[in-house]
Image (tube, rainbow, N blue to C red):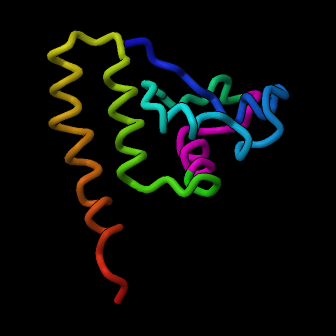
Amino acid sequence: RIPLEVCPTSNVNTGVVDSIAEHPIDELIELRFRVTVNTDNRLMSGVTMTSELAALVDVFGYDWARLRWLTVNAMKSSFLPFRERLALIEQVIKPGYAPLEAWENEPPV
């Protein structure tokens, strides 16, 4: 599969879209494209992976499960050998997101 490396903030800064809300990332995700979120040029865009993902959470309401899906897509799209990618997904990414997803689903106190 061919990944789509999207850089929403950079796309706003370069005039490709007027705002993150108008970025097609949400439609691409709903269509199950292998979307990865990237920063493009961090210096020029003044963005980090954290701020890029936070903007998507703010605009589209992404939850931890959606962020995990994007992170897994990024690892699946890396140039590491298949077994290494799979090991990182199963041993690092999924366990790393598990407590966040559990916390998100806890009833408020």
Where residue 100 appears, x then y in whole percent? 32, 59
Horizontal side of residue 51 vs 97, given as left or right:
right
Residue at position x 84%, y 28% in the image: 15
Instruction: Inspect the magenta stretch and tell me whether residue 102 lies in it.
Output: no
By secondary structure, the bulk of the magenta-drawn segment is best described as helix
Instruction: Inspect the magenta stretch and tell me whether residue 53 lies in it.
Output: yes
Classify residue 76 by image quadrant.
top left
Picture layout, residue 76 above or below residue 12 = above
Query: In this view, which residue lies farthest toward the front?
Result: 31
Horizontal side of residue 17 vs 101, given as left or right:
right
Residue at position x 64%, y 23% in the image: 40
> In the picture, which quadrant includes the C terminus?
bottom left
User: Closer to the camera, 31 or 65?
Assistant: 31
Where residue 33 appears, x then y in whole percent? 45, 26
Label tally: 0
Residue at position x 33%, y 33% in the image: 72
> In the picture, which quadrant includes the N terminus?
top left
Horizontal side of residue 9 vs 70, given as left or right:
right
Where residue 68 appears, x then y in whole percent? 35, 43
Residue at position x 16%, y 35% in the image: 90
Where residue 25 appears, x then y in whole percent? 59, 35
Start and end of the magenta stretch? 44-56
Classify residue 74 by image quadrant.
top left
